[in-house]
Image (spheres, coloured by chain):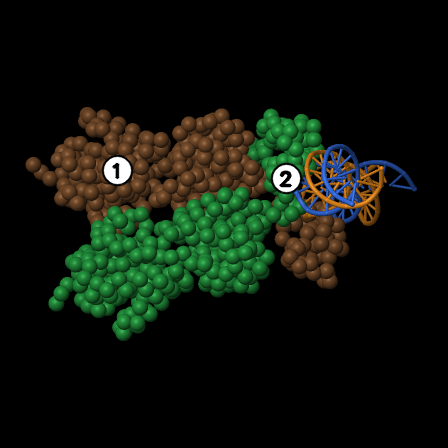
Chain colours: A brown, B green, C orange, D blue
DNA sequence: GAAGCTTATGTTACCCGTGCCATCTGTAAC
DNA sequence: GTTACAGATGGCACGGGTAACATAAGCTTC
């Protein structure tokens, strides 16, 4: 027992060493399970550790090894974007499992300068890897500089040099949603897309387009929203004025909420007059009226997979999480004429 | 992750110093905007920084001063809680403003052991402060040990020794919601509460109870959900079977979604048969059917305020963010009899 | 013109875990 | 008895930014 009870100061390995009557080096070896430590010595050391409530300090290792055992996560702050929580949880869980901690950097909006700043910030913190959960429009030189130095995985984003990409199969999501509507007998499927800078949005739109093309249908112009329910509402007011519209593929559940509201206000009911399929399967999708037919996305799994990809140098390249169509009550066959 | 991780030996301050023909200390002073640096010298240093692409390294500072300029954020992973994204964004923005980075620790469920582990993990990382955005049921000795060493602010949680508490005025939220229903002419207000471990839930319930008591009404038993829309749905099925129910105060928007669905399925329409007021004002609250009358919570602001409280040693004690009632269409006067 | 102060810069020591090498003991091999 | 070697442990330097102190020059004041 040491009489020196320094308040506020954490004990160091040297303190433990003194208490156990060995050198700091031996303490270090003991704690790292080095082979050449006598059983009796180990016991004494561990005892001292217990006694002093010694806590390992990673800073010196970071100092000499350059590794911080911290991963950076870039998120978009913009409200209402559900994927965030799921991806975050997945990333954090998988990282924690592997002994890494997660440092976040949110960017207020989709802007190259802000993006650069965030990457720089994470780089300054000395993160060992970066997970970008934000679409990248244009990749600047500076971004490349950083992602060249630090392993990077992009979840549902565009490709950076050296960055590995991973995500849900958005193309398939768009296809499946559209096909479901065609299968119900709809002759045409309209589309409310997400912002075109978002890879997800573009891929979903492509899936929709190609599915229509495969059925020999000329795709109507896509309407572009910003993921918000408000934008869905706005675009819904437009669609409600077009009598031909009987089926709409909406790029997110939240926009679908707005769309349904607009249609209802204009006297067009879902699914009797208009069928709607969206994407995400947020928790509330099953509890609105009518419950949404939607393509489920497993964000948690994506986040976890991103970390796995980052930490495991073996699995190079891309990987995709499947998307599954959940049929509820926002879709029906068109009214017979 | 192996050699790919190693950021090729980055230049150090000494390298910059050599390039600029000054001492490392002067470089340090320049980068930290110390007052006593000659303009010409500063120019040369910054030039060298640019040239060598020098990046600041925080590890040594953590090593010698113990300050990491990192804040820890404890979140609950459990899905569907809107508060998380808002609080996170607020925390990160305010922290970034002050030059701090944010490291997250999510706990899978409300469990003392997990909570301890998270705090320990953050403590190991050397965070300068901790923001707990999770309700604390019972505070263990180990938690106290940590929160005594590290400044801690709890957002909408219970009180830890030494931890400062901050949050939205939940009591007032419950009162305002209930009063609104009474003002419309309802004789009785039922309540679907959140889990009782949550301080928010308890405070909202108290506000409801006291408001009824003040009006001379005996409060009916509160039904307890778990914040999920599913639990709202389940409890809604029960309430739908009680003809006397004309007004319900629901502790969260998401539960309200479920409740409304259950009522509709049982042929009771909102707000004609039953009025509903909930809490949160999530983005979708305005886009469901009917749009929800709800008490708005500014999570972003709470998060930002938590950081301010943490970093500013002056402002001791608690602080409350106001809650405002947003009247939409889920409430109406009771049917006249 | 010496004391006293300000401004600008350099020097040194420190934080603490770990890689590397040195040391010491005991034991097996010749 | 001498060499060889493994096992166990200690000593020391290193990493990079910074607090604390030292130094040097310029300027004011009496």
Describe residue B106's horizontal placement relative to residue B284 as left or right.
Answer: right
Q: Nearer the viewer, mark 2 or mark 1?
A: 2
Q: How many marks?
A: 2
Tag 2 residue: B35
Q: Residue at x 52, y 45 (%)?
A: B98
Chain bearing mark 1: A
Q: Position of residue B118 (x, y in %)?
A: 51, 53
Disc 1 on helix, strand or loop?
Answer: strand
Q: Residue at x 61, y 39 (%)?
A: B32
Q: CA distance from mark 2 to mark 1?
A: 57 Å
Disc 2 on helix, strand or loop?
Answer: loop
Q: Residue at x 39, y 60 (%)?
A: B169
Q: Position of residue C3 (x, y in %)?
A: 81, 45
The residue closer to the viewer here, A6 or B41, is B41
| Quarter of the N terminus of chain A within the rendering | bottom right
Tag 1 residue: A250
The residue closer to the viewer here, B35 or B26, is B35
The residue closer to the viewer here, A190 or B30, is B30
Badge 2, how many Cα within 10 Å: few under 14, some, many 20+?
Answer: few
Q: Position of residue B145 (x, y in %)?
A: 58, 60
């Amino acid at each position: 027992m040491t009489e020196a009870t320094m308040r506020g100061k954490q004990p160091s390995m040297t303190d433990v060493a003194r208490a156990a009557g060995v050198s700091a080096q031996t303490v270090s070896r003991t704690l790292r399970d080095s082979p050449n430590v006598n059983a009796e010595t180990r016991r004494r050391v561990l005892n001292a550790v217990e006694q002093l409530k010694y806590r390992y300090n990673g800073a010196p290792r970071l100092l000499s090894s350059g590794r911080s055992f911290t991963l950076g996560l870039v998120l978009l702050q913009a409200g209402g974007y559900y994927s965030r929580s799921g991806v975050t949880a997945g990333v954090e869980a998988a990282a924690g499992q592997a002994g890494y901690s997660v440092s976040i950097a949110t960017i207020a909006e989709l802007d190259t300068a802000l993006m650069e700043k965030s990457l720089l910030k994470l780089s300054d913190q000395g993160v060992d890897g970066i997970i970008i959960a934000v679409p990248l429009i244009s990749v600047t030189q500076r971004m490349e500089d950083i992602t060249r130095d630090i392993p990077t995985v992009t979840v549902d984003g565009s490709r950076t040099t050296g960055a590995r990409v991973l995500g849900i199969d958005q193309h398939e999501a768009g296809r499946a949603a559209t096909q479901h509507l065609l299968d119900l007998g709809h002759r045409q499927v309209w589309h409310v897309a997400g912002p075109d800078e978002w890879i997800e949005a573009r891929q979903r739109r492509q899936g929709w387009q190609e599915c229509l093309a495969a059925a020999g249908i000329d795709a109507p112009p896509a309407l572009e929203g910003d993921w918000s329910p408000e934008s869905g509402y706005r675009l819904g007011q437009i669609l409600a004025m077009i009598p031909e519209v009987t089926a709409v593929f909406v790029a997110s559940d939240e926009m679908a909420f707005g769309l349904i509201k607009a249609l209802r206000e204009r006297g067009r009911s879902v699914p009797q007059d208009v069928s709607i399929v969206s994407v995400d399967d947020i928790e509330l999708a099953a509890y609105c009226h009518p419950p949404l037919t939607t393509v489920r996305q497993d964000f948690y799994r994506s986040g976890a997979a991103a970390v796995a990809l980052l930490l495991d140098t073996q699995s190079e390249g891309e990987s995709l999480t499947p998307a599954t169509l959940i049929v509820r009550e926002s879709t029906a066959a068109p009214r017979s004429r």
